[in-house]
Image (cartoon, grey):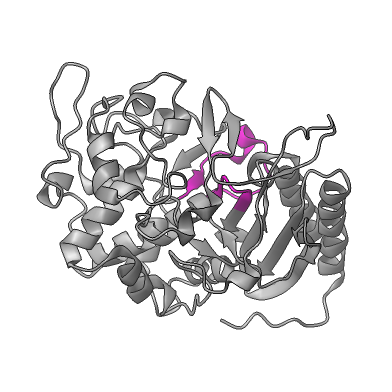
Amino acid sequence: MNLAVSVAPAAALSLRDRVDDALDRALAERRLVGAVVLVARDGEAVYRRAAGQADRESDRLMREDAIFLLASVTKPIVAAAAVELAERGRLDLDAPVTRWLPQFRPRLADGSAPQIRLRHLLAHTSGLSYRFGEAAGSDYDTFDVSDGFDQPGLSIEDNLRRLGQTRLRFAPGTGFRYSLGLDVLGEAMARATDTLLPQLIDELILTPLAMADTGFQVADYKRLAAHYGNGVAADGSRRPLRMHDGSELPFYDGVLRYAPGRIEKAGSYPSGGAGMAGSAGDVLRLLEALRRGGDGALAPATVATLLQLHTPLQEVEGLDPGWGYGYGAAVLVDPVAAATPQSRGTLAWGGVYGHSWFLDPQRGLSVVALTNTALEGMDGQFVRDLRDAVYAGLDGG
């Protein structure tokens, strides 16, 4: 994909000024340490900027080719691979997970162990949860379940054993709960194809889309950004604090547990929901491939499936009003209820290291903002300011 930079029309100049303002304010107010923001309209780069610091302590400036720990930006990549496997007849999304993981049989409160199908894992309708989505003292704490971006060195076998001892929150297919489903799915994909998940993702997604910076290992550690969490420093000032293995951030009723060093630790399982690292440019390549119908790398039917709503609005709990869920991302159903300028059918998601992205096919828009600051870069004011700046700039408002 070639995103040419040309002389921008007046609307794009307005967009550039507005996005600059949103980014500059977040940096000046120390809500962000650094960020890479890319905006494409109909395949043309109308905004691209690296700003702030990649590593504050060494005063290393952010670069456009910086590599970030992606957290849940991993999900659309793995979801695309799963659907592509299904289109090629190599995976049955209606099959029970026990076909490949026979010991994985979590139970409901009544002691029964219902079938979890692969598409339940994709759509977060399996009844599983995340540890960070549960209040302190839950069974996820009792069994020390990993959320896929903590506990360096933990194997997938150990985490599946722990997760399998937790209680299903509802019968599969009867509700929605954001979960470790894609971690389970990733291992099922690996066993179904007799291929390790990192190799499988490389074969199906990364190599065909030339996403050379992305993977379950860091492509170039010299370009890896340090990661920070919004908090209060020891001197009482509000500034993002550098993350280390064991850093924690409160998240609604739960706690996000981080281990930035996990990706370097041999034996850390390849988390299908949160385990990859990559660059903003690579994420943009994926979004543009979806917008273009696959770019020859993904089957058109795969793209159509990924753009669809799979969990109806009325069944989704925990998302903002107006949004349902697809495979790997939320899907905008009602822009009025969501109070957003985005078009119906927009896909959007983020990552707990501080990322957000959205794809608005109706407007031909792909927007990626990878930051090194949680949680501002995922669901803070910057995310809303960036969205509004993009649309106001396009519309000349």
Residue 317 relative to residue 86: left or right: right
The answer, for residue 290, to whether it is visible in the render is: yes
Q: For the magenta stretch, what is the residue range?
A: 329-356
Is residue 335 rendered magenta in the image? yes
Q: Residue at x 23, y 30 (%)?
A: 165
Please state which of residues 105 and 293 is positioned toward the viewer in this rendering: 105
Instruction: Name the side, left or right, on which 106 lies relative to 292.
Output: left
Determine whether 122 is above or below 197 in the image: above
Q: Nearer the viewer, residue 89 or 106?
A: 106
Query: Residue 196's image quarter?
Result: bottom left
Residue 62 rendering spot, x and y as whole percentages? 75, 65
Q: Nearer the viewer, residue 289 or 252?
A: 252
Find residue 101 and report its horizontal and vertical position in percent: 15, 48
Q: Is residue 42 visible?
A: no
Q: Which residue is located at x 87 percent, y 70 percent?
A: 10
What is the tally of numbered marks visible in this picture?
A: 0
Give the image quarter of residue 360. bottom right
Q: Is residue 301 magenta?
A: no
Q: Residue furthest top?
A: 110
Q: Position of residue 216 (x, y in %)?
A: 43, 64
Quadrant where the N terminus is found in the figure: bottom right
Residue 160 at x, y percent in the picture = 25, 42
Q: Is residue 188 above or below residue 302?
A: above
